[in-house]
Amino acid sequence: MIVVLVLAVDTATPAVTAGVVSMSADISELVVLAECVTVDAKAHGELLTPHVLSALSDAGRTLSDVDAIVCGVGPGPFTGLRAGMATAAALGQALAKPVYPVCTLDAIAAVEQGPLLVASDARRKEIYWASYDAAGARVVGPSVDKPAEVIERLADLAVSRVAGNGAKLYDLGLTHTGQDFPTPSGLARVARDAVLAGDEPGPFTPLYLRRPDAEVPGARKRVTAP
């Protein structure tokens, strides 16, 4: 039996997430060997690498044992998302291992039962969201909208439950599953088939969905007559 060791990371939400997951084509269930998660929206860059090393140590593995890396690519705020993706890309290049991109909302949905709507906090009083059918397949999104706009669409989306920290921050009027953030298990579940098949990873492109909050200032305006 061939066992594949996956390093799963995500920084698209306030949670700084790292975990070590083993998977095999002969066993349907994934095994989370260790994980390290801290909810701190201001410490993605500081905590992710220590979390990766801590998870590996707790799992009794080293970076050289990793066969593939799975990384959440958002949607998420620019600064936090960039920290996770830059770390995953650097590790993949250094280890010569494939890096598989995963929609962060898909990772949250992967550990729940559909039909479901997943929403994460997008700041600016908005949410990143997507809806999933009974089989867990994404059918709408990812998108970024005001909570009220999403509420107006709930009847058409045919979902009965919600997940994600955005759905808890803004009451969408449906039962919350209790799952706020992506987990190593969820990240690995989304990428499982591609990893086990040895498929070429898809484009490692962040899902920002909108422009960053911070922008390069334009040219200074002249305040005196020429």
Image: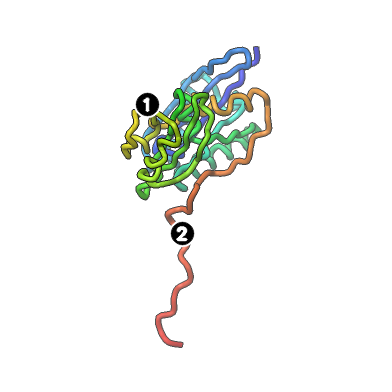
Percent position (x, y) of residue 53? 49, 29
Residue 51 appears in the rendering: no
Q: Which residue occupies 50% across, 48% down? A: 209
Percent position (x, y) of residue 1? 65, 11
SS state under label 2:
loop
Are there few (<14), some (14-19), or many (20+) residues within 10 Å of tag 2? few
Q: CA distance from mark 2 to mark 1?
A: 36 Å
Percent position (x, y) of residue 149? 39, 45
Q: Amino acid at mark 2?
A: Glu
> Which label's residue is closer to the chain start, 2 or 1?
1
SS state under label 1:
loop
Q: Which residue occupies 68% across, 33% down? A: 200
* Left-right relation of 33 to 69: left
Q: Decide: is 72 above or below 26.
A: below
Query: Residue 177: which disc?
Result: 1
Q: Amino acid at mark 1?
A: Thr
Q: Which residue occupies 55% across, 28% down? A: 190
Q: Which residue occupies 43% across, 33% down? A: 117
Q: Which residue is mark 2?
A: 215
Quadrant housing residue 97: top right
Q: How many marks?
A: 2
Percent position (x, y) of residue 79? 45, 47
Residue 77 appears in the rendering: yes
Q: Decide: is 74 above or below 136.
A: below
Quadrant housing residue 147: top left
